[in-house]
């Protein structure tokens, strides 16, 4: 305690004594013990009040040991179950966690991981994917202080995420892999990447591309077979050796009938090959008997035109033709959907033709749009033009429900360019994207859907949409989300059917059950999304006799059911709205593909490089005693004694207030009891 505080306490004592003396003893004729008792109570009350004002404090030192963290990371994927017995791994992990030497030196935490990481001590070895890099990165973000050691129980075979061999971790995090499974490199031949289209057209040929991979030192000659719905339709002999260890098969297959077709690629196994699961791979394609012809009509050269063409034609069901507005009207005969890019007065004949056939159109405007002409030639919307260009940031309308947007999002998307001016719709319209200009969100549409009298129209008030497609690639290393959104827009605009009150959103083919989800949207008679409805789904397996009926759960602006527990196979399903005579049926297929079964040997080399890059060491399950000895004796993990200073009040203010109230109350009661004022 500081000397200044001690002096203030002494002064408080003197002040309280002086006040009591003048109140009870100075020129006071009363004698006896009563005066002394009252004076004592008054002194205590005054002294406590002064202490409350002084608030004396003192410093208290607390000493504690700070231990390094020992993070036990266990690969809980199904491949671990095949490489080592479950009890063996559990016992090894248990020995580490319960070891007294390690507990004296470390604070031990246990995690398991597959595609995601979780803190648990239960092992099931049932995860269908492995992401080692995500598990290590997550641990690195959680434990940021001091020296930390990771014990990584894994076979080193990763099926998702970044390459963990080149992962950047903190300097104070060392990774010590415990390699589970057989590290022997066996001869193996397998089917690698398979590429095919999502759709094919009836009576047309569709391409399929498959890569055959070989690990071994001998020269081998094997046959590759491609089957369609179980029937062999293509074979080819290939020669592979140590130097030429891969070969790509390109084939053209005939689409003979409509429906979802299962495609299987097989390669002959090697003699005494240990792992034959990866000798085949299955995919699927949907054969359709109709095609949408889209015409992009533009009088200007712009990257948007090329980006739209590529995006639309990612679905083989659609074909895009780029035309000038001055071409003959006869060129529009077989066109199902028109995209009008930045119309000007040269589009006069185009608009005359579209008004006669009442076609569905997609209009894109920008800095080169002739607004005087466009406002006059069509009756769907009117836009003022102030001849001042502005950058417009998109803002997604989460309430949009005409069709599903899938995973499409516009967060951090670059702005579009268009002229300033208010927009007035002359027909019923629903906004997909709103405008944000100079950081201010405006209640103005950037992208809208107009539907009236069975005619559908989409309007985008901005150019440079090619930048959105590029941004989608930056975000996910592919164009899928943007292309899927444009695809859904094309499906909506190309359809002349009346809008259904029950919409379904699902994939016809799922690579594995972990991605199997079905979404449904239900609208009332005014076509407003009804979140209070009860929607159920009934699923029946075509071959395995499976049957289930379950409710679909509300998730924002749609209902969803997770089907990740289903086995591979083909399924029919029916979605029903309770209390309404409304239901829709469809089917889907789950492919039998398990990436965890593609390798049987542990990846010793990659785990060794990971240990070297993080100043760790590799171990095998038989080296657990050596591992414990090395960790418990490592100097960088010695616990550090630290101290913490806490400045606390000498007496709690609540106690002082209680004493003050008690002494004053006693003084008042005694004085009243003895008839004193």
Image (cartoon, rainbow, N blue to C red):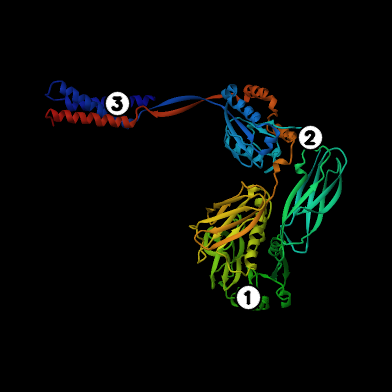
Q: Which residue is mark 1?
A: 358
Residue 292 in which image quadrant: bottom right
Q: Nearer the viewer, residue 222 or 67?
A: 222
Residue 314's tag is none
Q: Earlier in the sequence, mark 1 or mark 3?
A: 3
Q: Position of residue 96 (x, y in %)?
A: 61, 26
Which residue shows up at 61% across the image and 47% down it? 564
Secondary structure under tag 3 reads helix
Secondary structure under tag 2 reads loop
Residue 34 in which image quadrant: top left
Q: Position of residue 437 (x, y in %)?
A: 55, 61
Q: Earlier in the sequence, mark 3 or mark 2?
A: 3
User: Around disc 2, counting alpha carbons within 10 Å, would you say few (fewer than 14), some (14 to 19), or many (20 or more)?
Assistant: few
Residue 275 seen in render:
yes
Residue 11's tag is 3
How far is mark 1 from mark 3, CA to CA? 98 Å
Which residue shows up at 62% across the image and 22% down it? 632
How far is mark 2 from mark 1, CA to CA? 66 Å
Foreground disc of the pair 1, 3: 1
How far is mark 3 from mark 2, CA to CA? 86 Å
Secondary structure under tag 1 reads loop
Residue furthest front in the image: 545
Q: Position of residue 348 (x, y in %)?
A: 66, 78
Residue 185's tag is 2
Q: Position of residue 393 (x, y in %)?
A: 58, 59
Q: Nearer the viewer, residue 271 or 151?
A: 271
Q: Nearer the viewer, residue 61 or 85?
A: 85
Residue 66 in which image quadrant: top right
């Amino acid at each position: 305690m500081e000397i200044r505080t001690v002096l203030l306490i002494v002064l408080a004592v003197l002040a309280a004594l002086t006040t009591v003396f003048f109140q009870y003893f100075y020129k006071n004729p009363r004698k006896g013990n009563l005066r002394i008792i009252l004076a004592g109570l008054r002194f205590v009350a005054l002294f406590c009040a002064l202490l409350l004002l002084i608030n004396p404090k003192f410093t208290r030192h607390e000493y504690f040991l700070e231990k390094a963290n020992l993070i036990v990371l266990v690969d809980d994927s199904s491949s671990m179950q095949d490489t080592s017995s479950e009890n063996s791994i559990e016992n090894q992990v248990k020995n580490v966690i319960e070891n007294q030497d390690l507990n004296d030196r470390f604070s031990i935490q246990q995690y398991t991981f597959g595609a995601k990481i979780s803190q648990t001590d239960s092992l099931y070895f049932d995860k269908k994917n492995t992401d080692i890099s995500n598990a290590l990165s997550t641990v690195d973000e959680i434990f940021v202080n001091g020296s930390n050691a990771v014990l990584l129980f894994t076979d080193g075979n990763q099926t998702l995420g970044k390459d963990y061999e080149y992962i950047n971790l903190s300097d104070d995090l060392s990774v010590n892999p415990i390699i589970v499974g057989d590290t022997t490199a066996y001869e193996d031949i397998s089917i690698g990447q398979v590429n095919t289209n999502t759709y094919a057209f009836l009576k047309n040929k569709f391409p399929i591309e498959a890569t055959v991979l070989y690990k071994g030192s001998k020269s081998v000659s094997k046959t590759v077979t491609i089957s369609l719905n179980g029937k062999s339709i293509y074979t080819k002999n290939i020669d592979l050796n140590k130097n030429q260890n891969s070969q790509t098969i390109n084939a053209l297959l005939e689409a003979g009938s409509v429906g979802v077709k299962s495609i299987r690629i097989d390669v002959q196994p090697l003699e005494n090959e240990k792992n034959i699961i990866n000798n085949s791979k299955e995919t699927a394609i949907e054969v359709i008997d109709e095609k949408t012809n889209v015409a992009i009509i533009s009088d200007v050269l712009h990257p948007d035109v090329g980006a739209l063409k590529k995006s639309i034609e990612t679905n083989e069901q659609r074909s895009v033709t780029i035309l000038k507005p001055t071409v003959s009207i006869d060129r529009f005969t077989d066109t199902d959907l028109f995209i009008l890019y930045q119309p000007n007065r040269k589009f006069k004949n185009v608009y005359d033709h579209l008004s006669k056939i009442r076609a569905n159109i997609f209009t894109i405007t920008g800095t080169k749009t002739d607004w005087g002409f466009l406002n006059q030639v069509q009756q769907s919307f009117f836009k003022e033009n102030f001849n001042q260009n502005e950058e417009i940031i998109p803002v997604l309308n989460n309430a949009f429900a005409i069709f599903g947007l899938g995973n499409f999002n516009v967060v951090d998307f670059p702005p579009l360019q268009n002229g300033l001016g208010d927009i007035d719709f002359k027909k019923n319209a629903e906004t997909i994207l709103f405008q944000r200009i100079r950081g201010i969100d405006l209640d103005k549409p950037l992208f809208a859907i107009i539907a009236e009298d069975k005619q559908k129209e989409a309007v985008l008030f901005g150019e440079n949409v090619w930048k959105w497609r590029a941004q989608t690639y930056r975000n996910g290393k592919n164009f899928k989300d943007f292309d899927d959104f444009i695809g859904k827009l094309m499906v909506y605009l190309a359809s002349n059917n009346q809008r259904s009150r029950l919409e379904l959103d699902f994939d016809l083919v799922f690579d594995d059950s972990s991605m199997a989800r079905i979404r449904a949207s239900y609208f009332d008679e005014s076509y407003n999304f009804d979140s209070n409805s009860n929607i159920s789904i009934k699923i029946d397996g075509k071959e395995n006799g499976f049957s289930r009926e379950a409710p679909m759960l509300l998730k924002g602006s749609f209902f969803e059911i997770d089907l990740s527990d289903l086995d591979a196979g083909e399924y029919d399903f029916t979605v029903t709205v309770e209390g309404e005579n409304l239901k829709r049926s469809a089917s889907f297929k789950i492919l039998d593909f398990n990436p965890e079964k593609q390798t049987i040997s542990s990846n010793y080399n990659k785990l060794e490089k990971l240990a070297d890059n993080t100043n760790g060491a590799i171990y095998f399950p038989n080296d657990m005693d050596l591992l414990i000895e090395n960790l418990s004796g490592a100097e960088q993990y010695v616990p550090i004694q630290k101290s913490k200073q806490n400045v606390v009040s000498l007496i709690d203010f609540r106690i002082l207030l209680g004493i003050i109230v008690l002494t004053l109350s006693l003084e008042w009661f005694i004085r009243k009891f003895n008839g004193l004022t």
